[in-house]
Amino acid sequence: MRFSRTAALVCALAVAGGLTACGTEQKEPAPTSVADARDDYHPTVRDATTGLDGHTVFRPADLDTFPDSSVPVLAWANGGCRTSNISTTSFLSGIAAQGYIVIANGAPDEHPIEQLPDDTLARPDRLTDAIDWALGAGSEQFGGKADTEKIGVMGTSCGGVEALLAASDPRVDSVVGLNTGFFPRKRFGYERTELDKIEVPTLLFNGGDKDQAKQNSIDNFELLDAPAVLVTQETAGHSGLTYGLDAGDTSGPMMIAGYTMVTDWFDYTLHASAEAEAQFAGPDCGLCTKPTWTVRAKNL
């Protein structure tokens, strides 16, 4: 059952609108390989995490279409280090639709607060709690389909700081930090020396000159000793990638580009996909050839 990228976005938006699942197709026989299973866009569901408070699962609706122990687990941290994932429901559904289990900070019905306190602290333990749950009590919820040997963490803005902090957990294999980076002086409770603890492949993204995290992302990239990629998209700003905004356009193409970039990164670093690697590696990489996109890489 193949979904186009446009269909995947429509499904993601339907889930954001309150539907518990998107897409109806007749079930096909279970694929014989992970690659066969992941070659589709899958209808998704947004569930509570049974036995784990304060989190939400985004996943393919029919995990039976995947071989056992084949679906990687990604833990997500929200912008502002908030405990609500509602504003990124479409973005996270787009990632899940490509064959990932996403465990996001925040309960399904938790709404975002408008104003953050000045003393907001990053909480990487929320991400590691999600990993603990996925490897333990939560495994039953996924029917044996979760691949607990392939784990990624990701987040945006302050949540990106949380993801970078959680990347030092030995169970984590890859990390994505969107519109983020440690500040020159301690903020959110941490300093740039935390970058020394990261050893896994790291993707940092910024949205160009309108992204207040642009310089932090550049500085953090240069300080990393781990394999790393820095991607810039000049029109996304600070949150356009996750909200679907491109220089005032709200039609969604930027969101598709965003969750495609994230899943390409995890396809590359968790599944060793040569096709996905080609989006980031080399002077003629896939992202390098797109107008308004630039890519820097090191230690790959």
Image (tube, helix red, strand yellow):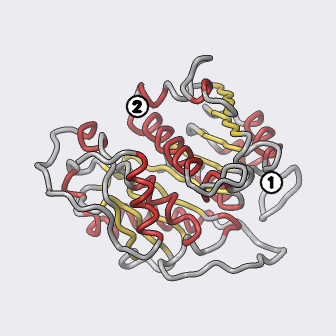
Residue type indicated by callout 1: Glu
Going by the picture, which residue comes out furthest to the top? 283
Under tag 2, what secondary structure? loop
Image side of residue 138 versus residue 244, left or right: left
Which disc number belongs to residue 191?
1
Residue type indicated by callout 2: Ala
Image side of residue 204 versus residue 95, left or right: right
Image side of residue 94 versus residue 167, left or right: left
Which disc number belongs to residue 272?
2
Residues under numbered marks 2 and 1 in contact, where contact means CB atoms less than 8 Å apart: no
Name which of mark 2 and mark 1 comes first in the sequence.
1
Does residue 165 show up? no
Residue at image position (63%, 33%) is 228
Relative image position of residue 215 (x, y in whole percent):
83, 43
- Kindly indicate the quadrant of the structure image that contains residue 294: top right
Nearer to the camera, 147 or 85: 85
| Spatial CA span between label 2 and label 1 | 32 Å
As displayed, is residue 122 above or below residue 145?
Answer: below
Residue at image position (82%, 61%) is 187
As displayed, is residue 39 above or below residue 43?
Answer: above
Which quarter of the rendered picture does the C terminus lie within? Answer: top right
